[in-house]
Image (spheres, rainbow, N blue to C red):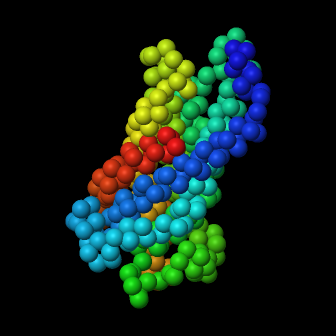
Amino acid sequence: MAAAEAELEGGGLARTFKDLGSGAAGGVAQVLLGQPFDIIKVRLQTTTQYSGAFDCASKIYKSEGPLAFYKGTLTPLLGIGACVSVQFGAFHWARRAFESRNASSSPLTSPTLSYGQYYAAGAFAGVANSVISGPIEHVRIRLQTQPHGAARLYSGPLDCVRKLSAHEGVLRGLYRGEAVTIIREAQAYGFWFLTFEYLMNADAKRNSIKREEISTPKVALYGGLAGEMLWIASYPFDVVKSKMQSDGFGARQKFKSMRDCFGQTWAQEGMRGFWKGIGPTLLRAMPVSAGTFAV
């Protein structure tokens, strides 16, 4: 108990910076491992010209070349490091706040979080992250779905930010789809951190060891499984977000709001419409999330 209290009281700022730095490194690994899968996911979510993931991959390769799988990489490479940094920093800040509260309310017991609190800390991290991830993912989706060659709409990330902001302003242009992004991030990272913490705690208890004694391969495995849960728990929200963020402007805009996008997707595609692209997403989730936690 004394050790737990010392951990809560000492080095809070240093620990936060450590969490931020670790998250940034994991974010870079996440982008480099997952970008080819991500462009396939987005294309399947936003168009009907592909019969499946392999058809999508082969057509991208044949018509746009191998480098097309890394379209829009610069934006997430710069931004996802910041996003994951915020995710880990915010999660561990909230975790320590819950531990402090638990220690104060029950001084004779361990301040360990309940799994509801782990979910809440993860959801807090997701909401904090959404301020950054919303526009970053919007720009990435625009770059991934724009026409190839001379017909392309944006010359790069900065040009995309400028043009999106020029349409309807920063909030309705660059931050389009932010409401569903916030919901997706809260649900996704609530389950991400909850699953990882549950697996880590269960392993430590089962083998009667400290968490820091769990091997890196096991950390990677539990991180990968957490990544699978992240997407299973939040994927329909991600589909709606991608549809809204690849939609046109003005007269070419199909969806008036998040609710309208949900309604049209259900009416035109049924339940399956909310799960398009889930295959490559789950294939991507295991190595990407494993690499993030391991790094």
Instruction: Look at 47% across and 29% down and name the residue there.
Output: 215
The part of the image, by quadrant, that contains residue 42 is bottom left
> Residue 19: x, y in percent?
64, 41
Please give the count of numbered marks on the rendered protein. 0
Q: Is residue 217 visible?
A: yes
The part of the image, by quadrant, that contains residue 218 is top left
**Closer to the camera, 48 or 70?**
70
Along the horizontal axis of the image, is 111 left or right of 214? right
Along the horizontal axis of the image, is 195 left or right of 59? right
Instruction: Look at 48% across and 52% down and name the residue there.
Output: 30
Compared with 2, 236 (above or below) is: below
Compared with 172, 270 (above or below) is: above
> Residue 44: x, y in percent?
32, 64
Report the residue that reaches farthest toward the bottom.
150
Instruction: Look at 43% across and 49% down and name the residue there.
Output: 288
**Closer to the camera, 125 or 205?**
205
> Residue 24: x, y in percent?
60, 51
Quarter of the rendering occupied by the N terminus: top right
**Closer to the camera, 6 or 25?**
25
Compared with 92, 272 (above or below) is: below
> Residue 234: x, y in percent?
44, 48
The part of the image, by quadrant, that contains residue 45 is bottom left
Instruction: Look at 69% across and 20% down and name the residue there.
Output: 4
Q: Is residue 244 visible?
A: no
